[in-house]
Amino acid sequence: MASNDLFGGAAARKQAPAKAAPEPKQAARASGTPGEAGYTAASIEVLEGLEPVRRRPGMYIGGTDETALHHLFAEVLDNSMDEAVAGHATWIDVSYEEDGWLCVSDNGRGIPVDPHPKFPKKSALEVIMTTLHAGGKFDSGAYQTSGGLHGVGVSVVNALAERLEVEVARGQTLYRQIFERGHPVTKLETVGKAPNRRGTRVRFRPDDQIFGKGAQFKAARLFRMARSKAYLFGGVEIRWRCAPSLVTDSTPAEAVLRFPGGLKDYLAQDIEGKLTVVEQSFTGKVQKPEGHGSVEWAVSWLGEDDGFVHSYCNTIPTPDGGSHEAGLRSALLRGLKDHAERIGQAKRFAAVTSDDVMSGCAGLISIFYREPEFQGQNKGRLMSVGATRIVDQTVRDAFDHWLAASPSQALKLLDWTVERAEERLRRRAEKDVARKTATRKLRLPGKLADCSNTSAQGSELFIVEGDSAGGSAKQARDRTNQAVLPLRGKILNVASATKDKLSANQQLSDLSQALGCAGGSHYREADLRYDKVIVMTDADVDGAHIASLLITFFYRQMPKLIEGGHLYLAVPPLYKLTQGAKIAYARDDAHRAELMKTFFTGKGKVEISRFKGLGEMMPAQLKETTMDPRRRTLLRVEIKPEDSAGTADSVERLMGNKPEARFTFIQERAAFAAEQDLVDI
């Protein structure tokens, strides 16, 4: 750094011996600072105009990658949006042309073209386009609220554009000026009369010297950015056009974007098709809170998907959040807490934090704020402290009314939030257990006999019924990659059980802890401790019932485990058939009959023994027939996407809390059951 060189030179001169002054080169060598004589005032470079932007584009747009490239479009579009928000423009045209040209025009007031008082030889337009920190956003009288605050936006675009053309229609006259890499190549020209036109048109192409050869805008990204602006201000119409050669599957060639519903429409589009906790989203808009523009919000809660919060200030996206997001979080937490107190459930809600409320929250918050303070030129985070108070108070009042007006929905949201808190506390307890195992060995969940493989890849968990079957399975397993978890009898039917029973059931708790992954929307594939989860029950009616209960548990509590292809059913034999040295195992009666006809063809009596359960099988037999990957048969449990509704209906009908539905099912299949009995006889 120059400052270090200066300090170093001063120190060297102070230590130089007192004698006649040598020649400059000798002085440099004697001082121990090579090249000091060459470091003069001429070495201090002064960058003027827009040259700093071209030298260090990262300081102004964050870099030269794809995100930075599209920031150029955002800067130009924001200027037109400021005109619309101020009430001077009703439409904005966005056109993505051939050869990478991008054009944004509006019907606003148009950039002033008269001579600038401070630079009388230049028009105000040229000053704005070629001078940093020049613009109309510093004067609060020109714009009540705006996105541009530093006066560098469009001048930065000009600096980083290979060519930029500006047309302004003011006073029924059309003006034009052309720039290349930030420098004007023409004077401000009067093109002619424009009696039916007003506003500004900016057309530019990014510079290959800055963004690299072949760098160009993505049509889909431009379209999404334009559409989000239309959502953020319902009073503007954005007209989109894209050259046919640049159109993609997700991008229309032409579109008119106008959304009078604002954020309400935006949220509905974002969560379309997703399961929500509440039926009606919490939406609203308040004008002029504490003298500022407005506060608008749209919030819902997703039952099975991760939440998100997108925030905006003066139509500028703030991906890093900030004070307005803090106000939203505070309003939602305090509103739910007060509602819990009003209905006598404050004790249940005591452990809930804002993270629990926001974990599945799908939220949009947009404020129009006078003279906001952002972090950095890219405006990624809002820093205005007053925005927190304004959003908190505004949203909180509306949220209190929304909760009171929909008590059933409020109770659903309250229950869901409490579940998130309980899940968080459970995970914290599991982490505490994991930390303790580093110093002392604890009893594994339930009676789990874990495998030595620490990776999920290739590991298997066998879920068996009872200690007897568990004992045989533990002896038959491969300890390297096969774990065994015995369960005591029939587990709880989760399809008809209450939440309290579910949370209090020790067997299901042991099973969940052994798997390591949470259920529902909190299921995490990365935390699953086993690649295959294998239900291994007796080959009889009771075993089939236990298997059905376990499948129902996974279907209701961990559907993504099934979708990931991790759930299997083992196929243990029901019979052992022996004829001399010949031995075979039959899965069921039909398989036994088939073996009698095809395998045991010689003379001699065939001894048939029926296994009463896995616990009565010798470990070697269990390994040979059911657990050895080289010989066993596994059935993978799948849910066909095209029949998901039918699957849900069948589970509810057969496993739900309506016995009449099961009775009807049995009556409908009575003839089939009778036929099966005749076959068995």
Image (cartoon, helix red, strand yellow):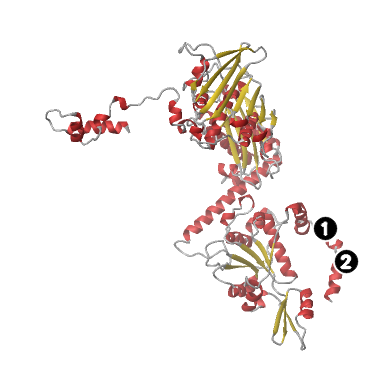
Q: Position of residue 177 (x, y in %)?
A: 55, 18
Residue 492 visible in the picture? no
For mark 1, give the secondary structure.
helix
Residue count near mark 2 (Cα–Cα under 10 Å), binned few <14, some 14–19, many ≥20? few
* Disc 2, SS: helix
Quarter holding the N terminus is: top left
| N-terminal-most mark, 2 or 1 | 1
Q: Nearer the viewer, mark 2 or mark 1?
A: 2
- Label 2 amino acid? Ala
46 to the left or right of 420 = left
Numbered label attached to residue 671: 2
Could you tell me which residue is drawn at 76 percent across and 53 percent down?
643
* Residue 583 locus on image (x, y percent): 70, 82
- Indicate left or right for 329 with 18 as reference: right
Q: Quadrant of the C terminus?
A: bottom right
* Rendered position, 234 above or below 510: above
* Crowding near the residue tagged with mark 1, few <14, some 14–19, many ≥20 C-alpha atoms within 10 Å: few
Which mark identifies residue 660? 1
- What mark, if any, has residue 440 been given in the picture? none
Residue displayed at 67% across by 33% down:
244
Q: Which quadrant would residue 450 be assigned to in this image?
A: bottom right
